[in-house]
Amino acid sequence: MTEERRIGVYVCHCGGNISDYVDVKEVAETLAGEANVEVASTHLFACSDASQQEMIEQIREKNLDGLVIASCSPKLHMFTFRAMAERAGLNPYEYVHVNLREQCSWVHKGDRPGATAKGVNLVRAGVAKAALTHPLTPLRIETQPRVLVIGAGAAGMRAALALADMGLSVYIIERESEPGGWTAKVGRMGPDNRSGPEVAANLFERIREHQHIALFTDAELTAKSGHIGDFQVTVRLRGEEDLSLNVGAIIVATGFEPYRPRAGEYGFGLPGVVTLQEFRRMLEACEGPLTHNGRPVRDVGFVYCVGSRQEEGEDCPEPNAHCSRFCCMATSFSASLLHEVERKSNQTINQYHLYRDVRTYGRLETVYTQARADGALYLRWDPASPPRVEPRDDRLAVTVKDTLLGDEELEIGADLVVLATGMVPRQNDSLNDILKIPKSKDGFYNEIHIKLRPVETAIDGVCIAGTAQGPKNLAESVASALAAVARTGALLKKGFVNLEPLVAKIDTGRCVWCGECFNACPYGAIEKIHIGEKEVAMAIESSCKGEGGCVPVCPRDAIVIEGYRDDQIMAMIDASLEEAVPA
Amino acid sequence: MTPLDGKGAPKILVFSTNAISDPGIDRAGSAHLHYSPAVQVIPLPCSSGVKPSWIVHALERGFEGVFIAACGGDCAFLPDCTTRTATLVTRAQTMMKEHGISPKRLKMSGLCSVCADNFVAHMNNFQEELQCVEA
């Protein structure tokens, strides 16, 4: 039997948000007389400074060794109260948070006795869990002041410069033989008409001059071990020589691939049907009139949303549901570039932009406005009847139902049809095997939280930047790269990192090494070790995510996650079912 | 549909997940939706970590149903989380049958961090269904 604990239970009114629907006094009074509870009381606002001070004094005075606070959702104040516990001299992991607002008072507003009885059960479960806590220490890891940046496109290079300016050393590796990525290949970019190759060359020049950055081209990551703050990585140079590096963090800026249409998709494969990227290269190379097949170009059709916002169908079993963000702007900007060719060479070129929605958001709207002012025609189609592109008398015929003209079917003769091809995830199977960053449904790398943690990944110490995460224009790519720099800088400039100790623990007495947990862990956090003659599994604390995927697969019941141990969960279940004692 | 309230409403234990489904369940609260107080939640890090033995224990001790509010496709830890959780459910149902408990007393559904309405609908439906389950 475990020793009696001295737990403090504090039930919050939340200024009426809880106490209007739950009798908090009854909850506290019921708990006050129960096992392991030394003191139970209520607070008007437990999170207020005054209440925290009062609780701290009581914890010290009564020498409490556990703490349960029943208040709002743990997403709001779990860390507040963990810090308070620490200030009071308690181990923060001997604190248990009970969600009495979002999961009780607010959802049972019309049933005060029911809500109060449930409140008692919730707090009882919290006490049962707290009674089985023991002090845990966060794992403190010294961090190495060096960063590996994967990918020397605009995002990777911009990140490297910002990190180096912070005083961190940066290794930037690029698979291609030239840095610059797609930015170096794109030509002029809207809305400010800057040259992509110039932007890339400027970044590269600054990198070359920076004493804290080493850039390797023809370089690929071939191995990664270690953990946040202290990774060992191997980089293969020119396919032969291996370079070993020790870095504290990694930023993945591996970019995107342009969508490659299927044969026949909007006429792709027919002479004169080109992708947006091919068309931009034609414009860059064009001196004088724009010609195709030796003839001056008179009519150009643009089909938007090719490879983006797709719907599942027979010819598209794995649709790209995402919007590629940059293509409406880039295609409308191409209209202006084409108008420029027209003016310079005194050529007349009619432009037909067949779009679904024009998403030139924010100030990019000026690009769309300019294109129309210069004479580009925009026609809207519906995905239920997409445009058709067919060969017609040495030219192309584009048939479209214009939804803004009452679905009237128009046939447009064209010399060129430009498919506004979007972004798809880059094929990087070997890198994915090494980094193990979770991917989202669209195949791009996944952030931890789309809004609040937009550049961190489930792999601690590894951030994503730029279009490796999903479609972005250049400005957004650089913004995300600098966000990744901020997170990485905050981690490495501090010099150390504390990791949550709520991770897997293996009972080596029970374990007989069957390998099930090893197979269940995608993070390489399970290692086979020898204890004397016996082979057993050991969890590597710094690599373990604490999600518990290994726990139910263990046939010997030898694994627990701290904070969610079997005895704690069982005790919570039992405590939840005790009959409420009337006050 | 009228939620089943007060005494006699089937007690449901929900296993939620800290990053995905628990925020979705919180959202039902923030939106001041309503479900039965016989529903009680224990949050865990991820639904792939639920042990079948916990489920059987909960049902033997007096919960009438267990609902796993799974991470689904949004899981930040395991890309195959749904498959893993589904495997656990199958294992748990086998174990439940061995203990003479109807497998209908266990349900699982992916619940996202904004799935407030879904959660409430699941709870109401599950309570209705549990009233017809015999074993």
Image: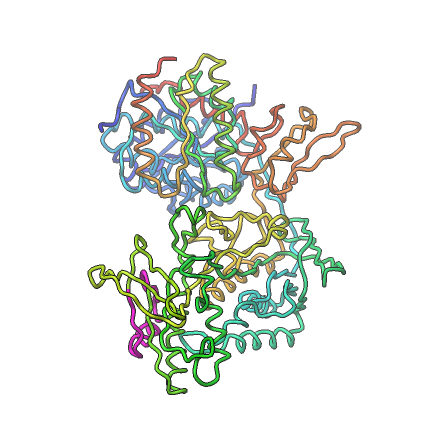
Q: Nearer the viewer, residue B61 or A280?
A: A280
Position of residue A444 measured from the top left corner of the image (x, y, whole percent): 50, 53
Q: How far across and down, in percent of the image, does residue A391 sit?
A: 39, 65
- In the image, A434: left or right of B19? right
Q: Quadrant location of residue A335?
A: bottom left
Tell me if A356 is positioned left or right of B82 in this view.
Answer: left
Q: Judge whether residue A445 is colored magenta.
A: no
In the displayed orientation, state which residue is furthest to the front.
A393
Q: Does A39 sit left or right of A540 as displayed?
A: left
Front-most of A118 and A252? A252
Where is the N terminus of chain B found, in terms of image quarters?
A: top left
- Residue beneath the point at 45% across and 59% down: A471
In the image, which residues are magenta?
A: A355-379
- Is residue A61 in view from this perspective? no
Query: Where residue A162 sits: x, y (%)?
Result: 56, 68
Judging from the image, the colouring scheme is rainbow
Determine which quarter of the picture holds residue A127.
top left
Residue A509 location, quadrant: top right
Question: Is residue A377 located in the magenta-colored stretch of the structure?
Answer: yes
